[in-house]
Image (cartoon, rainbow, N blue to C red):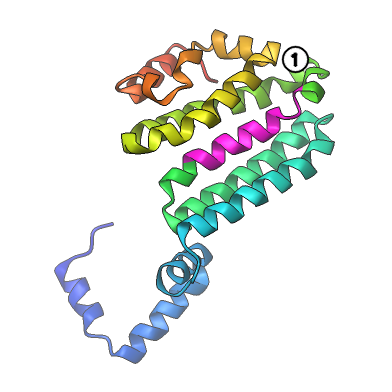
Amino acid sequence: MEYSKEFKAALSAFSNTEKDRLIFRLLKKDPLLSKKLYFELIDPETIDNKRNTMEEHVQEKILMASKYIGNPKYFLTIIRKISAEITEHVKITTDKFGEASLNLLLIDRILEHNEDLSRQRFDNVYKLYLYLINKTVRSLLLIKKLDEDYWMEFDEQLENLKKKILQNHYLSKLFINNEIDFNWLRSENIPEHFDLVIKEIRSQGFLR
């Protein structure tokens, strides 16, 4: 929404007291904005601090969720909630590095339970596996947009992730069937215009 000069001028004409009242009314209706402003204005923690806390949180949550792997539908519901918490962290802190690293951590910790996942019927875990593939693709898109100086920091994560994917027969096969190249799991090998590559793959009906 664009604001006219007249509207901006009318807002500027408010007294400090009126502006304060308006701000607090708006903040009550938007908790996420409240958290973002708190972080930007007075929170003593840095983005790195917040990311480290989220890393611990994600690992603990996945460990707790792992007891529900036998119920893939419910397990995926829990995973989506954890993913939403990562998204909230990113919106509050604008942590672009963390957006990629935390999602890769999420996938990695899920695949720590490959043995349990492999006991499930493929049609029961298909949606979970497709979700993980799309999460991986999204993470690669994010990495490609970051400065190249950061890429090396992701390569260990990506290498570990690749090993775990290849240890899971059906998941690795689904990666291939959706035309995702395992060579892309290295920062420097992510194709130029990767967003267009993925757009073309989706246009062919994959990743769905």
Picture coordinates of residue 18, whole percent (x, y): 35, 88
Q: Main secondary structure of the magenta part?
A: helix
| Residue 120 lies within the magenta run | no
Quarter placement of the C terminus: top right
Q: Which residue type does callout 1 highlight? A: Phe
Q: Which residues are magenta?
A: 100-114
Name the residue located 47 percent from the left edge and 62 percent from the top edge: 46
> Quarter of the image holding residue 36?
bottom left
The residue that appears at 46% across and 78% down in the rendered structure is 25
Give whichever of 111, 148 is nearer the camera: 148
On whether residue 105 falls in the magenta region, the answer is yes
In the rendered image, residue 123, in percent from the top left (x then y), is placed at 74, 16
Residue, far left: 5
Residue at the disc numbered 1: 122
Q: Nearer the viewer, residue 71 or 19?
A: 71
Tell me if 182 is positioned left or right of 145 in this view: right
Give the camera-side residue of 34 and 52: 52
Q: Secondary structure at mark 1?
A: helix
User: Is disc 1 surrounded by few (<14), some (14 to 19) or many (20+) residues within 10 Å?
Assistant: some
**Is residue 133 visible from the viewing direction of this image?**
no
The N terminus - image quarter = bottom left
